[in-house]
Structures are given as structure tokens and as C-alpha cells.
Image (cartoon, coloured by chain):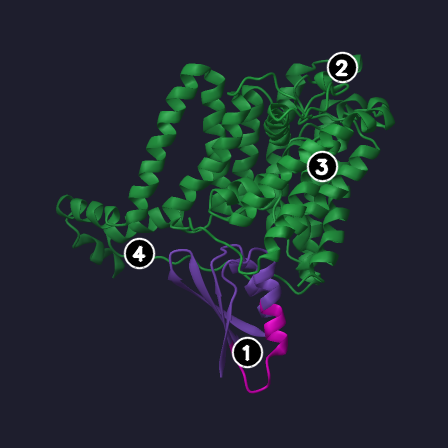
Chain colours: A purple, B green
Amino acid sequence: MSKQLDVRGEICPYPMMRTVQALKKMGKNENQLVVITDHAPALDTIPTQAIRLGFDVKIEEVKSSEWQVILTRK
Amino acid sequence: MQAQSGITDSPSKRFWEIVATNIGDPNIYKGAFAVMVAVAVYIFANNNEIRMGTYWLLGLGAGFVLQRTRLCFASGFRDIFLLGHGRNLKGILVGLMVATIGFSFLMARQVPNTALGTYPATAHTMPLGWHTVFGATLFGFGMVLAGGCVTGSIYRMGEGYIGSWVSFAGILLGLFVASFTWNWWYEFTIKDSPRVWLPHTFGHGGALFLTLAALVILYFLVIWWETRRGGIAPAQPAQLLPDTTFSNKVQNIFRQVFVNGWHVLLGGGIFGVVNILTFVSTRPLGVTGELSRWSLSLGNALGLTPGELLGTSSMAGCVLDTGDGTFLTFLLFLVVGIFYGSFIGALFAGEFKIRIPKQKSRLVQSGIGGILMGYGAGTAVGCTIGAFFSSIPSLSFTGWAWAFFALIGAWLGTQVIQRLP
């Protein structure tokens, strides 16, 4: 199951903090979180925390200055 | 074989197709138009005074590099605690190393004999006292609350972050308030505070060596700390076209320069070079002195003036400036240049976008953070640029003290923002 988290409009450190909160709340049957952000620095901070929490990271550019960070439980 | 697919490109025929492909991207039009405006401003500034033109170019360069590398001082001070991640701090340290080497040569020419006890006239050697402790701590705290330092807010304004515009207004207000308490701080501590310039004790070579050694040790400490906190994610791979045809190669170069973020260590290094060039022209980088001039001139127009600010005329660096009624100064071109350079970078990258936080309380947070930063910078004589990024390379001990207390403030800030909604 996949969940979505929209943090567009938020700047550092909130995209990362929101993602960590969401990852920690994820139930056993959920294994994917898709974070949508328009804040480029979050493309460094979110992966660092997600990897430490045991997730794989994939980043896709949705359009100019908007990205999907796809976090999948290892 | 890969080389063969390149041969199918007939360069002359393909050239115009490649141009067409690239010009089809509307971001190039927007960016090119913004560059033409920048050139027009340069001609105007240069006709006014050569130094204004020079500072306009330096400001543009600084803003563009900051936008491309996303170098962020607030993150540098904050994320070492919050995230155990030193991406920005490492970039800043490299920038400091580069600037330190350049500055020390320039200062050795200004003060050939350190035994005389004189100071390099334009370097950022500020008095060190309780005002540094208080102002830097407040600055570090405000910067984390606002999510960006003074320069960070200026270049984010150019990317369309509304929160940064609110921070900026807060900074001007904070500087204005600081001017009314300046004389109290001056009598209390600033007038008796020493300007600790390391070459007086260690000579030029010794001070340069000690500063570089400290920066290198800090760099390794940051890596050690990152490893201890669980390592950091490798930089995301750049999104590029397959490197097979000439057209793709051209487009990839364009993407590497104008769209993808640059490596932060490269960015820090270039920012250090910009600082050296600024010093070569007149004086090192600094923004809060100029911002205080805007803020105090605005107050003056409204009939609110702090009166004479004691000791400011003889002080170096980003000291509060009441202004003399002139509108255009070379520093104005520097500050506006940082904003505009970032705007150009954001246009080319397609990253310019008006961004309003969904949660309106964030705007209040940005404003309060800005006011605290403004007051802190007005009192401690400078921000992350003037009192830190230009002060440590000036071989001034005050820059180190400023950094230490700003770090404490940033730590306090991280404790607060983690408890905010």
C-alpha cells in the first residue's frame, strides 16, 4: 500500500521533519510513502533520514521544480 | 559501440536543430531576458561609478552561485544537530578555507608589519564582547526559526519564497530596533571590547596556518559526526539524457550548469572566491550594514531616528549605518545583485515559483525569526556573511566566537522548532 504526503510550500527543515513523522507512523502493511515537494534542498535531507530509517529512495521530477520522493521499505 | 552513434550526427545539419531544441525551452527565454536587464543595470551602474558596476556583478555572481548550489548557512548551523548532516557546513568550511588564503595575502599587503599593532583598514575585525555573545546567539536562534539567514532569505526571495520576504521585512525591523539600543550596548561593552586580530599574536603566516588547520580539523569532525549519526545519503544522480548524440551532450551541459544543483563544495569554493574579489575591489562581503542603512533611512523618512550612533564611524565591517541621504551606493548594488542573481538562476532552472506556506503560522514564524536576526546582527556587528564568512578569513578571533555562539543559538532554535506545530 502506498501513502502520499504533500509538503509543497514548506521549507527546510519541515519537509524532512514531516516525512520522518509519516515514516514512523506507517503501519506494517504499508510499505511505500510518496512525498511531493517543491523545495530542492529537501532532496538531500529527506533521503538521508529515510535511508537511516530503512527505506529505499527514488526521486522523480514531476515538472519544473516539483519532485516526487518515493520511499519504499527495504 | 557508443562512438558510432555520434558519427551519425552531421554537425552542420544538426546544429540548428540543436539550437531549436534548446530554444524551445521557455526557461531559456525568461533567463536570457533577465540577463539582458542585468546587463542594462550594469551599464547604468558602471556609468554612475565603476565600483557600483563591479559590485553589481559580484552580487549577481554570489546570488547565482548560492541559488545553483543551494548553499545555506542556516542549514549549516542547524542540520548538524537536527539531522546529523553537514552538507552545507562542509561547503561553508571549504569557502572559508579559500577566502582565508586570499584574505591573508591582501591583509599582508595592507599591514606589512604586524608588530605596529595596526589593523587592516577594511578587513572584518570586529570588537569581541558581551554584545557578540548576545547578538550571535540571538542571530543563530532567529535564523533557525526563520529557516534562513539574512543572505539566505535574500536569495530565496529571488526564488519566490514569500516566507523569505516576510523574514526580510523582519530583519529590517530588527535592525531598526537595534539602532535604538546601540548606544547602550556601546557604553556597556562595545567601547572597551578588544578587536582580536590573530596576526598581532602569531604573525601573518602563523595566523593563516592556525586558521586553516582549525578549518580542516572541523571539516573532519563534521565527517566523523555524520558517520556517527548514521551516514548521509549519496547525492542524487543528475537527471540527464543518454550521452550518445551531440545534441544530447549539449543539452546535458546546459542541464548540468543551469538546471541541476551544483556540488556544494564547488559552490562554497566559488563563494569564497567571490568574497576575495569583493575584498580586492573595496571590502569583504557583508550585507547587514547596508540593510541597516535602508531600514534607518526609512525610519528617518518617517521621523523616527536613533540619533548619533556612538563609535560606528570608526568601526569596520557590517556596523549600523544611518546613511547620508544618498540612494545609490555600491553596497546597494551588491545586495540587490544577490537577489537578482538568484532570480536569474531560478528562471533558467525553472525553479522560480511563488511559494506560500499552507500553514499561515509559518509566516509569523519567519517574521519573528527575521526580527531576532536583525536585532542580533545589529548588535553583534554582522550576520553569517559579515561577522562570520568575512570575519574568520580576516583572521579575526571574533569570527570564531560569533560562530560558536550562533551555533548555540541554532541548537536552541532546533529545540524550539521541533516543538512547534
Please tell me whether mark 1 sits on a helix, a strand or a loop.
Answer: strand
| Nearest-to-viewer mark from 3 and 2 | 3
Please tell me whether mark 4 sits on a helix, a strand or a loop.
Answer: loop
**Tag 4, which chain?**
B
Disc 2 designates what residue? B118
| Nearest-to-viewer mark from 3 and 1 | 3
Name which of mark 3 and mark 2 comes first in the sequence. Answer: 2
Stretch of the chain drawn in magenta: A19-32
Disc 1 designates what residue? A73
**Tag 1, which chain?**
A
Please tell me whether mark 3 sits on a helix, a strand or a loop.
Answer: helix
Quarter occupied by residue B41: top left
What is the distance, in whole Å, between disc 2 and disc 1 at their CAs?
62 Å
Q: Is residue B344 left or right of residue B122?
A: left
**Tag 2, which chain?**
B
Tell me which amino acid carries mark 3: Tyr
Look at the numbered discs 4 and 3 and tell me whether their residues touch, using CB distance below 8 Å: no
Residues B239 and B317: in front is: B317
Do the dots labelled 3 and 1 sit on one chain? no
Look at the numbered discs 4 and 1 and tell me whether their residues touch, using CB distance below 8 Å: no
Residues A23 and B279: in front is: A23
Residues B115 and B162: in front is: B162
Disc 4 designates what residue? B243
Do the dots labelled 3 and 2 sit on one chain? yes
Residue B391's disc number? none
